[in-house]
Image (cartoon, rainbow, N blue to C red):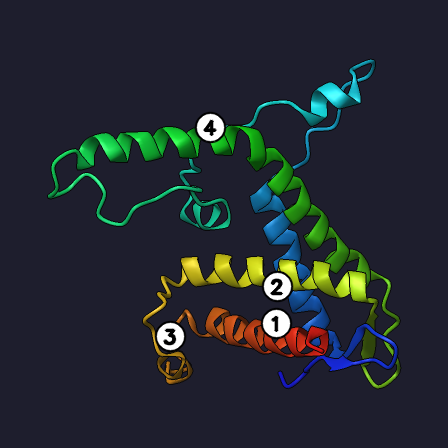
């Protein structure tokens, strides 16, 4: 999958995608939408402003991928171990994280959902030519939404693959074809190329 984003004159970006790439991207985006969950639409007669300021959850998600997408705002590696008062500090950080999550996670979920919906709608609007491909063109605003969605897709897949910051990408390339993780690894690496080249189009 060699598709890479290129900058468009006057702003925005474009990438050529074949039918398989379009299908894979759309499938991954839909799965991410399902993971994030549906939005909380105001009920009939409910004040939209009240729904806007509704409190969200205070505890981090139990799903590791969701926990990566919605991490605690305050964390201290190794908190609660070793130093005097560390346990009290750990409790304080957890309380701060819970408070922050309560008032920000709903909005963050909505933004991430909108980013992924922009991907799905952009792909659905493509017209595949007789050669079996299409050119996706994004405005500068759409590029930012795609960038957010691509980042979230890679975080999710990387969590499922248990990829850490210390992992060498080369090791992922060397997986044998018989490894059941190989298709997801190839998608992870390809999304990385898309993300990196899209960032480059946004860099002055």
Counting residues from the start of the chain, the first of labels 2 and 3 encountered is 2
Verify CB contact (< 8 Å) between mark 1 and mark 3.
no
Q: State the SS at label 1.
A: helix
> Mark 4 — residue?
99
* Distance between the alpha carbons at the discs numbered 2 and 3: 24 Å
* Distance between the alpha carbons at the discs numbered 1 and 3: 25 Å
Counting residues from the start of the chain, the first of labels 1 and 3 encountered is 3
Is residue 14 placed above or below 146 in the rendered structure?
below
At horizontal 63% and vertical 22% (from top left) the residue drawn is: 54
Counting residues from the start of the chain, the first of labels 3 and 4 encountered is 4
Residue 98, percent from left and from top: 43, 30
Verify CB contact (< 8 Å) between mark 1 and mark 2.
yes
Residue 202, percent from left and from top: 71, 73
Is residue 177 placed above or below 154 in the rendered structure?
below
> Mark 2 — residue?
150
Counting residues from the start of the chain, the first of labels 1 and 4 encountered is 4
Check residue 179 in the rendering and tell me which mark sits there, or answer none.
3
Check residue 195 in the rendering and tell me which mark sits there, or answer none.
1
Tell me the quarter of the picture where residue 20 sits: bottom right
Q: Nearer the viewer, residue 79 or 128?
A: 79
- Which marked residue is nearer to the observer: mark 3 or mark 4? 4
Is residue 41 placed above or below 198 in the rendered structure?
above
Verify CB contact (< 8 Å) between mark 2 and mark 4.
no
Left or right? Give the position of 101 relative to 14. left
């Amino acid at each position: 999958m060699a598709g890479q984003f290129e900058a468009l004159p006057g702003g925005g970006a474009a990438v050529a995608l074949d039918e398989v790439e379009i299908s894979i991207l759309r499938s991954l985006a839909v799965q991410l939408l399902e993971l994030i969950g549906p939005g909380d639409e105001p009920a009939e007669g409910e004040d939209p402003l009240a729904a806007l300021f509704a409190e969200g959850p205070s505890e981090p998600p139990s799903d590791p991928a969701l926990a990566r997408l919605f991490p605690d705002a305050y964390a201290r590696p190794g908190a609660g171990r070793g130093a005097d008062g560390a346990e009290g500090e750990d409790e304080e950080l957890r309380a701060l994280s819970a408070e922050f999550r309560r008032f920000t996670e709903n909005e963050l979920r909505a933004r991430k959902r909108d980013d992924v919906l922009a991907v799905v709608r952009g792909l659905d609007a493509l017209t595949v030519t007789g050669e079996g491909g299409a050119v996706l063109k994004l405005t500068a605003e759409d590029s930012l939404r795609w960038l957010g969605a691509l980042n979230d897709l890679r975080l999710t897949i990387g969590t499922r693959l248990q990829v850490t910051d210390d992992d060498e990408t080369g090791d992922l390339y060397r997986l044998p074809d018989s490894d059941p993780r190989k298709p997801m690894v190839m998608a992870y690496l390809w999304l990385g190329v898309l993300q990196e080249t899209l960032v480059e189009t946004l860099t002055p």
